Structures are given as structure tokens and as C-alpha cells.
Amino acid sequence: MSTHPDVEKFMTMGPVLPVMVIPSLDQALPLADALIAGGIRALEITLRTDCALDAIRLISKERPEAVVGAGTVLTPKDAEKAEKAGAKFLVSPGLTKTLAHQDVLPLLPGVATSSEVMKALEWGFTHLKFFPAVPAGGVPYLKSIGGPLPQVKFCPTGGIDAKNAADFLALDNVLCVGGSWVAPAKAMNDGNWAEITRLAAEAVATFGKK
Ligand SMILES: O=C(O)C(=O)C[C@H](O)[C@H](O)COP(=O)(O)O
């Protein structure tokens, strides 16, 4: 499936797509609530933990105001499981032929080089995650890619935080940024949900809408 029109909707819902790693199911609703209270509604739950699918199921059911997506989607099987759990979109760190052809849910696939962008375009993807954003070259790199490939819109992710997000968001080819900095493991482990609401609200207030 090529880029679904809904992908741009999810990307422009907020300037920040939180990358959520949820180790324990009892953290799922408090974390979602903390982010929602801070003004973030599009939530990416990575399929990196055992309870990730259950967390997607729980948040989708109990918090209909949130738009829940699955992250770290690697295979079409992952896509099917995420859809069954209630996810509305998929995010992957890279792109393979089989993943490019899944048609279960709208996909935001990851790329890191111009050849990968060109291959994604051949498969019909115009909206991509730039991953890992900072280690791969950061703002100047993504700006350069926008020279020959201006038709592609990105969600840079990987190494982004409150300090460098604005520099990425200032680029013409960036619609939103992704990151775990608004849902840090330490605050989650401490049950410090107020801190997560503060970080989310700070991101929304600082970066506003693109
Ligand atoms: O899980 C995935 O699908 C990924 O592609 C990786 C995440 O997007 C990054 O790990 C987030 O990076 P940080 O904000 O630097 O923690």
C-alpha cells in the first residue's frame, strides 16, 4: 500500500509523535492519560515489549480520543496483529518489499538514505520516517535530501528532544518529529505521570502546529 491519506492526518495532529515503550500493562493507561492531558493524541506504541499489543488494545478501547499506532512494525504479520489489537496506523524503522505491500493499515515507513527514499517513492510512499535522525546526519542531512527529493515529507525520529526538535520542524520537508523524550523510562518507572504531562505540554506549547 502506498502512502495512505490518513498518514498526513496523523503526522499533523501534533508536532510530536511520542515513541512509547511500555514494559508493563499497568503503565499503559496512565501513560496514555499523561500524554493526552499534555495535548498529544496520536500515540505510537512500539511492539518491542511483551505487553505492547495488549497496551494497544487497552488504550484503543478505553481512550477513544487517542489515535493509537503501532511502532517497530517489521513484518506484515506484525501489521496484522497490530490491526487486530485496534491500531490505526503503523510505523516501521525501515522498509522491506513485503512490508511495502501490506495493505492492512496506513504505514509510515523508515528510511535513512536517498536510495531508500527513491525505493520508497517507487512503492508509492511520499511520507516517511527519517530514522535514526540524529546519528544518520541530523538537520543538514535531511535538508540536503530535500534538495533533489522535495516531494517527500518526513517525521525525523531517533535522538530528538526538546532542544533540537525545533531545528528539524523548521525544515520545509518535516511535518512532525518522533521521540521517546516525552515518555522517558525513568518517569514511567517512578510513576511520575505529572512529569510526562509537563513534557508533552511543553512540546505542544513550544512547537505548536506545523
Ligand atoms: O521502534 C522503532 O520503530 C524505531 O524506529 C525506533 C524509535 O523510533 C526510536 O528508538 C526513538 O528514538 P529516541 O527518541 O531517540 O528514543
Image: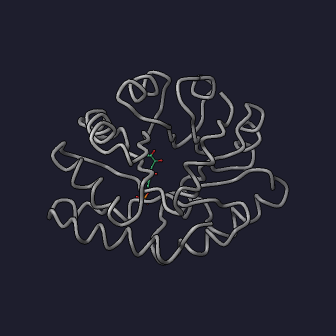
Which residue appears at 17% of the width and 60% of the height?
A: 189
Where residue 203 sits: x, y (%)?
45, 71
Front in this rendered view, residue 117 or 5? 5
With respect to residue 14, does 93 lie above or below?
A: above
Image quadrant of residue 140? bottom right
The structure's colour scheme is one colour
Q: Residue furthest front?
A: 65
Which residue appears at 37% of the width and 65% of the height?
A: 182
Question: The C terminus appears in which quarter of the rendering?
Answer: bottom right
Image quadrant of residue 184? bottom left
Left or right for 70, reference 183: right
With respect to residue 168, does 99 lie above or below?
A: above
Left or right for 155, reference 184: right
Where residue 103 sits: x, y (%)?
58, 23
Which residue appears at 77% of the width and 59% of the height?
A: 146
Where residue 111 sits: x, y (%)?
62, 46
Where residue 73 sits: x, y (%)?
46, 35
Front in this rendered view, residue 25 or 97? 25
Which residue appears at 58% of the width and 67% of the height?
A: 209
Left or right for 54, reference 11: left
